[in-house]
Amino acid sequence: METALVLAIGVLYSTAIYSLLRRSAVRLALGLVLLGSATNLTLFVTNRVTRAHAPLLPPSGVPPLHMMADPLPQAFILTAIVINFGMLALLLVLVHRTDQAVGSDDMDEMRTEVPPSSKHGE
């Protein structure tokens, strides 16, 4: 199972880097989402993939520590998902607004064109 996950991580990272190197702002956003997903999956795999019990106390009060999952990596992954979602929302708004102002999502065209509302001296 770990081998399949490691291969999926490699595919996600390579697709993310490929998308980040494209000139389209939408592909940049897609690449950042894939990069965040690959990082979350990396954190998941480094925690050991097991079918352990949730870290809750049983009614007897004595926890079987050898059978419980570590909750810290799960908290890291959940926090990373929330941060990735917030970053994606901000990036999509910026891409949409830039596309409205410039009329293109090509990074080279954005660099050369200046929208009429942002010219200096007027």
Image (tube, grey):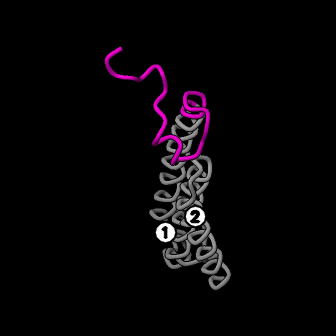
Q: Earlier in the sequence, mark 1 or mark 2?
A: 2
Residue 45 screen position, x and y as percent: 55, 75
At 46% from the left edge and 31% from the top edge, which residue is drawn?
Answer: 114
Residue at far top of view: 122
Is the residue 7 above or below the residue 53 in the image?
below
Q: Residue 86, percent across and down? A: 51, 41
SS state under label 1: loop
Furthest toward the left, the residue is 121
Q: Amino acid at mark 1?
A: Asp
Write down the region rendered in magenta: 97-122
Of residue 99 and residue 115, the one placed in the foreground of this image is: 115
Secondary structure type for disc 2: helix
Q: If the image is split into quadrants, where does the N terminus sit?
A: bottom right
At 52% from the left and 61% from the top, the residue drawn is 74
Amino acid type for the residue under numbered disc 2: Ala
* 112 or 58, nearer to the observer: 112
- As measured in the structure, the alpha-carbon distance from the residue carrying label 1 to the one carrying label 2 is 29 Å
Q: Nearer the viewer, residue 6 or 108?
A: 108
Q: Quadrant of the C terminus?
A: top left
98 to 109, vertically: above or below: above
Q: Which residue is mark 1?
A: 70
